[in-house]
Image: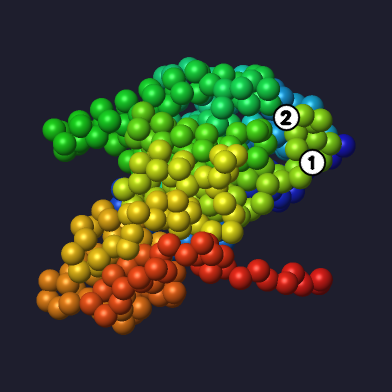
Amino acid sequence: MSHPSVLERLKILADAAKYDASCASSGTAKRNSRDGKGLGSTEGMGICHAYAPDGRCISLLKLLLTNHCIFDCHYCINRKSSNVRRARFTPQEVVDLTLSFYRRNYIEGLFLSSGIVKSSNHTMEQLIEVARILREEHEFRGYIHLKTIPEADPELVEQAGLWADRVSINVELPTDTGLARLAPDKNGATIEGAMGKLSGAITEAHDARKRFRKAPSFAPAGQSTQMIVGADGASDAQIVGKASTLYDRFALKRVYYSAFSPIPEASAVLPLKRPPLLREHRLYQSDWLMRFYGFAPQEVQQATEEDGMLPLDIDPKLAWALKFRDRFPVDLNRAPREAMLRVPGLGVKAVDAIIMGRRHRTIRLDDVARLTVSVRKLRPFIVTADWRPTLLTDRADLRARLAPPAQQMELFG
């Protein structure tokens, strides 16, 4: 049997990497090669072909070093027992591909993950070698994200942060029960232990940079993780609680959510179909509420239905507001920023603009309309100089009035 070409292996290993959603490139240190030294930049944009959950367009060469794996996680297409075509790159081949794509302005950086081949330590050494060659031998100044392996020696995991802009360790599933059932080779305590060590190293490096100007940088874009949604029986309330714990304990930059996708020859313990993509979207919205709108995790969990799931027909902020109507309406001319951020339909920029505007004039409904896509959702929850909802906030059919209208699906759409 002939050895697959680089192009054939690229097709296999780039496709195998599509299930990892945590590939945004925000938050890194700014570097460029305008001084004539090195290659690449973290600031320029190439031909974008991927979108972060926040809508930002990014361009990263995203692939696996190999899809061989000694683990047998039920939900993974590359698991040991999976009947898929296998391929593998050498570290130098990944370096050559990265430089070639960068010189053609196709990418702004590299996102590199891998199956576990031979051992966790061996695989981690190979991933680190790719980043080391790029940085040390080619002075590559573009973005590098390494997906690290928690079972590897802590020294190797921490070494990844010396070469990469961002490092990440996937927690895989939101509950220890789900992890034990679907990923028997992995251990939740080991994963979180590795995340804790990375978090400590990032904090120490940040403090050192404050004291010593030439202290080496360590994962300047921080650490992220990913959870699979819908493979086990975890509810949205459990997922939100887990995400909040991870943010607090490990100072993560992002928690990514990846809707479970059925795979060929799947294990009998997996669901037969994927969860609605809208569920993944609602979880990202709930994540935004905690990170940017001042919602406590318990408040987001209060927005769920009796089964612990976020409603799909309305967003989490509106669901929370409908459950706590006694907090509304909010007077936009007098209310504090924290209260206005809880108004469905008002974003952070709109709230800040209202606060700035009301210093000079009285806020009217037309002023709010100019700051939002639609003022219809806001009317039951706000008071302005010329608008008061009276009994509208207490209507029994308010949810039905505010939910998006049902759309007829196209047969051939």
The residue tagged 1 is 272
Whether residue 45 sits left or right of residue 388 in the image: it is right
Label 1 sits on a secondary structure element that is loop
Label 2 sits on a secondary structure element that is loop
At 47% from the left and 32% from the top, the residue drawn is 242
Q: What is the C-alpha distance between the residues marked 1 and 2?
A: 13 Å
Q: Residue furthest right?
A: 1
At 66% from the left and 33% from the top, the residue drawn is 232
Task: Give the vertical position of 174 relative to 254 (above or below).
Answer: above
Label 2 neighbour load within 10 Å: few <14, some 14-19, many 20+: many
Q: Which mark is residue 22?
A: none
Tell me where residue 41 appears, x and y as whole percent. Answer: 38, 55
Q: Amino acid at mark 2?
A: His
Q: Is residue 257 visible?
A: no
At 59% from the left and 50% from the top, the residue drawn is 279
Image-quadrant location for residue 361: bottom left
The residue tagged 2 is 74
Tell me where residue 257 appears, x and y as whole percent. Answer: 54, 44
The one nearer the camera, 356 or 40, is 356
Quadrant of image for the C terminus: bottom right
At 12% from the left and 76% from the top, the residue drawn is 360
Tell me where residue 313 appears, x and y as whole percent. Answer: 59, 59
Image-quadrant location for residue 329: bottom left
Q: Is residue 239 visible?
A: yes
Q: Please state the total of marks drawn on the protein image.
A: 2
Instruction: Say which label, 1 or 2, has the lower sequence index.
Output: 2
Image-quadrant location for residue 393: bottom left
Which colour style is shown? rainbow
Mark 1 or 2, closer to the camera: 1
The one nearer the camera, 86 or 399, is 399
The one nearer the camera, 120 or 284, is 284
Task: Give the vertical position of 265 relative to 44 (above or below).
Answer: above
